[in-house]
Image (cartoon, grey):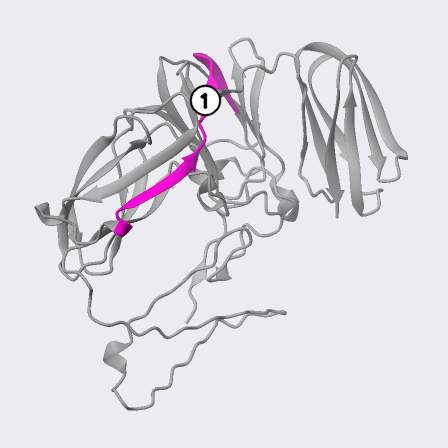
Amino acid sequence: MACKKECALNPVYPQGGTWVYDRAGWCPGMATDVKEFDITPLVTPGQDATFDYGINVVTGASNYIVNNQIVEYGAASFTVDASVIDIVKPNDKIEHGRGNPVCMNPIVQIKNTGSTTITSLDIHYGMEGSALTTFTWNGTLPFMDTAFVPLNIANWSNTAGTFIAYVSNPNATTDQYAQNDTVRSNYVLPVLYPPGIIVEVKTNNQGSGTKYKLKNDAGTVLVNRLGLSNNTIYSDTLILPLGCYEFQLTDVGNDGLSWWANTAQGTGYCRIKKIDGTLIKVFNPDFGAEIYQQFGINLLLGESENNSSSTAQLNVFPNPAIDKADILIDFAKSKDAELRITDLQGKIINQHSFKNIISENYSLDCATLSKGIYAITLITADEVKTVRLVIQ
């Protein structure tokens, strides 16, 4: 059997055309599922056994490549053996990209590979080469079961590097097999914002499906907006103390604030600005179910995203586009600029000049253009910036 898998949180995105279409055990940009079934009670030694593998039948063309394996195990080699399977946070692997980088609570996955049920163990974790933190886990973990364990906030370093986690003292005794006790992960650091920021969200035609919140590393919710109106700009000005913060925006329809396959929902946006209005961050509105970011305020960690004083922001939504595309231009200070749309042969299809602008939303009529790839180029006196636009 194959269970439906929701594809709205693919770690690789944007994924044009895939968000709302659930699949049987897989999603584009996501690792395929591996299902394990204990068939011991269903077979008799020395007798033939027949197993059927089925998939949900849908209309239209479909193609599945399925791999099945039968594995025979002997008795457990150890009675007391705990292991670490993975470090979910912090980690720079693509499959964990939706939840990283972090400056809050690490998450590790543990497994019981001994025959005795584990009810307690110690997890040691932190930056390799620095003093580690110890967390004592209590619960019930039968043989071959796994558990995801959120840990206390680590002693974060001010540089990227290697995170280490290892287990010890399962059931307050000695672990009988040390080779599976330790896992390491590479990690990068969250972005660094100034103490004063503005969170600005514009809803699309389906505002009630959007909500967002911001909380600090103590779990206190500082902003919580829901029940939003259509095509409305919401702005929250915050003066934040030193610490780590978590921002999350969700879309109930799983198709973001803009999606080419649902032009009826319109286009919204999500931005972070300085108090003076300088743009720091523009999130891609084609995000599926969620925008998620952890960031630091004046911490000794992270890569600064508040140094945009000389760099233009050029974004095109939706992308791919069908009937029209919104070209969003933002500067740190007013400038004269020229916008050019060219095809792959360099022919100018459209161009427009702007005088003394800080922010501009230029609507491009795509209905008269042929399907293909175009270059959107922004030209000022001191820089040139280009993005690609796909017209379907």
Give residue 97's position: percent from left, percent from top. Answer: 47, 40
Span highlighted in magenta in the image: 179-200
Number of other residues with Cα within 10 Å of mark 1, as a class: few under 14, some 14 to 19, many 20 or more: many
Q: Is residue 73 above or below residue 195?
A: below
Q: Is residue 263 above or below residue 55?
A: above
Residue that extends furthest to the left in the rendered view of this protein: 172
User: Which of 265 and 79 lies nearest the eye of the viewer?
Assistant: 79
Magenta segment main secondary structure: strand
Res 72 quadrant in image: bottom left
- Which residue is at a point 49% across and 59% down the rendered structure image? 26
Q: Is 212 placed left or right of 329 in the picture?
A: left
Q: Is 45 placed left or right of 158 in the picture?
A: left
Residue that extends furthest to the bottom in the rendered view of this protein: 47
Q: Is residue 333 above or below residue 177?
A: above
Answer whether residue 125 is magenta in the image.
no
> Could you tell me which secondary element the residue under label 1 belongs to?
loop
The residue identified by callout 1 is 302
Answer whether residue 192 is magenta in the image.
yes
